[in-house]
Amino acid sequence: MRWIVVSSLVLFLFLGLTASNAFAGRVYGDIKLDGKPVPANLPVKISLAPPDSGAADEVTPAPAVIDSTVTDKFGSYKLAVKPTGKCILSLLYEKQTLALEVFSYKEPARYDLILEKKDGKLSLRRK
């Protein structure tokens, strides 16, 4: 009996320590350009959206990055986000940083994105 209790405690402790992102929501998806996946190793990061302040002259600090990753050969990305709410997803492509407002939840949220070039300008939008 004692062996079962001890082994159960060890198992739960091991699972708790190895699953640090177990309670984090995920933001994931694919990024496409001209109907094809974007190149591998494009930096993608997510940060909390700055709080709305009523004063226009008030300077808000840059939000801290929550998680960052790079795209794989299929243009896919996966980010772990512990806080829920409004976030900013940023992508670096051809020396331009493109940003999109997204929301994180306790459950995984899929954001398939389209990278577009219009009149020489890049834009990022949800599919």
Image: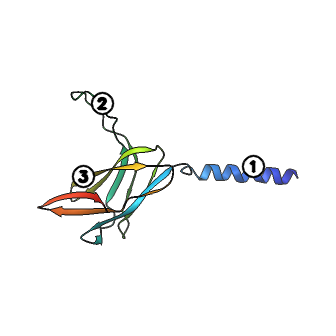
The spot of residue 2 in percent (x, y) is: 86, 50
The residue wearing badge 2 is 53
Describe residue 60's horizontal placement relative to residue 108 as left or right. left
Q: Nearer the viewer, residue 105 or 1?
A: 105
Q: Residue at x 25, y 30 (%)?
A: 59
Return the x and y of residue 77 as percentages of the image width and height.
39, 61
Residue at mark 1: 9
The reply to whether the C-beta atoms of the residues labelled 2 and 3 are less than 8 Å apart is no
Residue 27 pos. (x, y %): 43, 55
Q: Earlier in the sequence, mark 2 or mark 1?
A: 1
Residue pictured at 47% horizontal, 49% vertical: 105
Q: Residue furthest left?
A: 119
Whether residue 78 can be seen here: no
Q: Please, what secondary structure does the residue beneath circle 3 have? A: strand
Which residue is at 46% across, 44% downward? 84
Q: Quadrant of residue 93?
A: bottom left
Task: Give the answer, above or below, for where 28 lies relative to 46.
Answer: below
Mark 2 or mark 3, earlier in chain: 2
Q: CA distance from mark 2 to mark 1?
A: 47 Å
Q: CA distance from mark 2 to mark 3?
A: 24 Å
Q: Which kind of residue does numbered mark 1 sit on?
A: Leu
Residue marked by disc 3: 97
Residue 23 % position (x, y)? 55, 48
Please determine whether, in this image, residue 70 is positioned above or below residue 24: below
Q: Amino acid at mark 2?
A: Ser
The local secondary structure at tag 2 comes to loop
Which badge, 1 or 3, comes first in the chain's sequence? 1
Q: Measuring 25% from the left and 62% from the top, which residue is drawn there? A: 115
Q: CA distance from mark 1 to mark 3?
A: 47 Å
